[in-house]
Image (cartoon, rainbow, N blue to C red):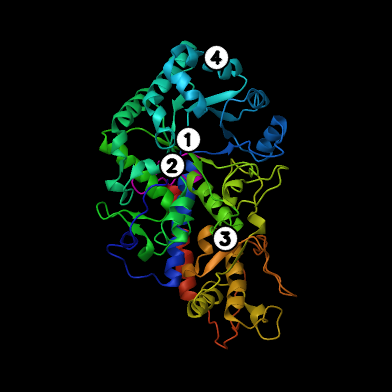
Amino acid sequence: MPHTPPLLSDFHSVTSPPPLSFPGMMAVLGLVMMLLLAAAASADEGAFVGVNIGTELSDMPNPTQVVALLKTQNIRHVRLYDADRAMLQALANSGIQVTVSVPNDQLLGIGQSNATAANWVAHNVVAHIPATNITTIAVGSEILTALPNAAPLLVSALRFIQSALVAANLDSKIKVSTPHSSSLILDSFPPSQAFFNRSWDPIMVQLLQFLQSTGSPLMLNLYPYYDYMQSNGVIPLDYALFRPLPPSKEAVDSNTLLHYTNVFDSVIDAAYSAMSYLNFTNIPILVLESGWPSKGDSSEPDATVENANTYNSNLIRHVLNNTGTPKRPGTSVSTYIYELYNEDARSGALSEKNWGLFDFNGVPIYVLRLRDSGTVFANDTTDQTYCVARDGADPKMLQAALDWACGPGRVNCSLLLQGKACYDPDKVAAHASYAFNLYYQMMNKAPESCFFNGVATVTTTNPSHGTCEFPGMNRTFVNGTALAQSQNSTSGTGSQYVRNDGAWKMMMMTIGASLVAAVIL
């Protein structure tokens, strides 16, 4: 079971600052985005995003097809749930870094016999080195929570595998660890007070000693989807999906006053604290599984294509931006997405079959919304995303955001005038969607540019209708100048949008200052 969700009272700021004005908020977001991009450009290349390759498909592609898809998508890190010989041979000379796994049903034998462990390493690792770039061995999966009877042999299995690597002179190249469910962390919010299930302390201490001595990471399987589902409404959906949150809705650690904007970071920091509680402070974390299902049954209404796309796109950006966590800024946690394919042969709930990025033919279930990822997932929908009004958004907030977009936001809203192509339907949500999308395109589709105080959202569905076309590509710049501003655009309510040149200049000066700061940093 996933870790205990935070209390409802945790989701407020201890000292909430007054809300920023809309222009002020966007200026700050512009500054932050520039600084993040600068940090990403100069940070170490250590953090990566990989994928898990499950095989429970009724029509599983052959290994050669799998590797071809990986190459097409620029996926450079994969995790196998076993050490399948055909798959390892197909990965040979691909340059892809591979994590192989000791299945749970083999753990007992390896944990009881050094010779069995040496034989496993010889057949499943040494036989494929160096052509296949095996970098990590995951011993078992969630043993303490899924197979507790085998727990006493877990550390022995790790040590025996490590000894075999030492004998083969591969211990400096290949790390050995074991993945845990994040439910092993109890009282995970606030993160500063988190600890591992104390009934496992004797084993965890031995495990952490092994990881520290070998320079190996603590592996976690981390699923904000399940945390959200089991919180009974306590955890906001936006908090689980990495969507931007106003400061008043951020979760605050009352001990450290650190603000948390997503479940992922809070669990990672909880794991750091749990290790620190046992006096281990220098062990890195590797997330071996994380993702979001794209389809579910009636009891899982938030298992949708849109939410899966949002979570995985934001997760990839978060890891590759090297922002780290509130407790350890700048220390990003490499993560493997669960998973490459939808597994239609899996048992259980409908969602269990629908965690994949692709179907068995290699066709995307959805196309990730990425910008400047650089190293992963070449199939990028940057030119196929739109920013629209969020369903159910407060009309007054929509109107305020619309006024800002067509005013200081410098969006050309002339097509919203009566008689023009985008006037109908004469509703604030429709007009706001058009203006939001123009601003989003103008800002090069930066994620923060589709927020508008929480009343906007990104979609892959083209909202164009009739003769009203919503631009989906960054073609709105001429000689470096953004969309021209209309000074007489009107909404369906009849109010006029008047450009606030002072606010616009202030915003541009702030962004300019951020560029200078980025260069200096």
Up/down of 314 relative to 204, above or below: below
Circle 3: element type: loop
Mark seen at residue 332? 2
Q: Amino acid at mark 2?
A: Ser
In this rendering, does residue 516 appear at all?
no
Image depth: mark 3 or mark 2 in front:
3
First-in-chain label (4 vs 2): 4
Q: Residues within 10 Å of mark 3 (few under 14, many from 20)?
A: few
Asked whether the residues under the numbered discs 2 and 1 touch, taking CB atoms below 8 Å apart as contact, a structural biologist would say: yes
First-in-chain label (3 vs 4): 4
Does residue 332 show up magenta in the picture? yes
Q: Residues within 10 Å of mark 1 (few under 14, many from 20)?
A: few
Indicate the position of residue 291 as horizontal and vertical percent values.
53, 47
Mark seen at residue 46? 1
Image depth: mark 4 or mark 2 in front:
4
Q: Amino acid at mark 3?
A: Ser
Q: Give the CA distance from mark 4 to mark 1.
A: 28 Å
Indicate the position of residue 486 as horizontal and vertical percent values.
61, 78
Q: Give the CA distance from mark 3 to mark 2.
A: 36 Å
Q: Is residue 95 left or right of residue 211?
A: right
Residue annotated with mark 3: 298
Up/down of 157 relative to 62, above or below: above
Up/down of 318 relative to 153, above or below: below
Circle 1: element type: loop
Q: Give the CA distance from mark 2 to mark 1.
A: 8 Å
- Of the pair 445 and 148, the residue shown nearer to us: 148
Residue annotated with mark 4: 122
First-in-chain label (2 vs 1): 1
Q: Residues within 10 Å of mark 2 (few under 14, many from 20)?
A: many
Q: Which residues are drawn in magenta? A: 320-335
